[in-house]
Amino acid sequence: MIIENAPLDEWLSPLKKYQQDTFKQLVNENGVEDATKLWLSAQGPQSTVGFGGGTSNPQPFYDKFMEEFRKFMCGDPTYDQVRLQLGLETPIVKSICITTISAALGATLGFTATLLAPAVAALLYLVGQMGVNAWCEVS
């Protein structure tokens, strides 16, 4: 799979405006990688359980998310069918790519694609900056 080396704004453009704005603010204050971690650790409204579950430590969810994203990007057979579906799209449209990957990871992790989409977009941006093979080597 080839991931386009495009500006972060292009990767975030398929997201809803509130997601774009919030995520861009996190990036401006923390950088892309830390913004991704902060997004995934968001607790949301006080009456609900955050992404990371009932604990105040978001690390376990972030680690699991990164493990699944790495499996997806680096060729783990678990995601062969999804990668095959994406490979049929030429060229890969960012919105389809973000939605498909978010849905596949969300199904494994038990979260909706909408909640994961900004993190997926940011990581696709980072992968695009390095290239898939280089990213897989260092992640």
Image (spheres, rainbow, N blue to C red):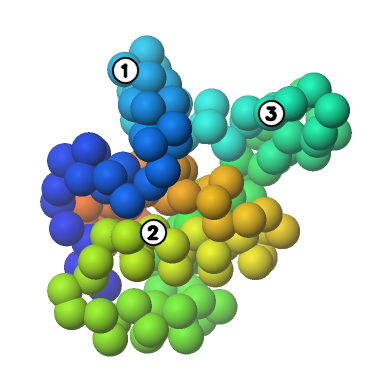
Q: Secondary structure at mark 2?
A: helix
Q: Nearer the viewer, residue 41 or 89?
A: 89
Which element type, helix, strand or loop, lies under badge 3?
Answer: loop
Is 68 drawn above or below residue 2 in the view shown? Answer: above
Residue picked out by circle 3: 44
Badge 1 vs badge 3, beta-carbon distance below 8 Å: no
Q: Which residue is under mark 2?
A: 98
Upstream in the sequence, badge 2 or badge 1? 1
Marked residue nearer the N-terminal end (2 or 3): 3
Residue type at the position of mark 1: Asn
Q: Residues within 10 Å of mark 3 (few under 14, many from 20)?
A: few
Look at label 3 and name its amino acid: Gly
Quarter residue 43 falls in: top right
Q: Between disc 1 and disc 3, whose residue precedes?
A: 1
For label 1, the crowd category at 10 Å Cα-Cα, with few meaning under 14, some 14 to 19 and many 20 or more, is few
Q: Residue at x 66, y 65 (%)?
A: 108
- Please, is residue 121 above or below residue 99 in the view? above
Is any part of residue 90 visible from this angle?
A: yes
**Residue 88 image position (x, y, % from top left):** 28, 86
In the drawing, does residue 26 fall left or right of residue 3?
right
State how far apart marks 2 and 1 are (Cα).
Answer: 21 Å
Q: Looking at this view, name the residue that lies furthest to the front.
A: 17
The alpha-carbon separation of the residues under discs 2 and 3 comes to 22 Å
Circle nearer the viewer, 1 or 3: 3
State yes or no: discs 2 and 3 in contact (Cβ < 8 Å): no
Percent coordinates x, y for residue 120 in the rendering: 43, 50
Side (left or right) of 68 relative to 128: right
State the count of labels. 3
Residue occupying the point 36% across, 42% down: 122
Quarter of the image for the N terminus: give it.
bottom left
Badge 1 is on which residue?
28
Q: What's the amino acid at mark 2? A: Ile
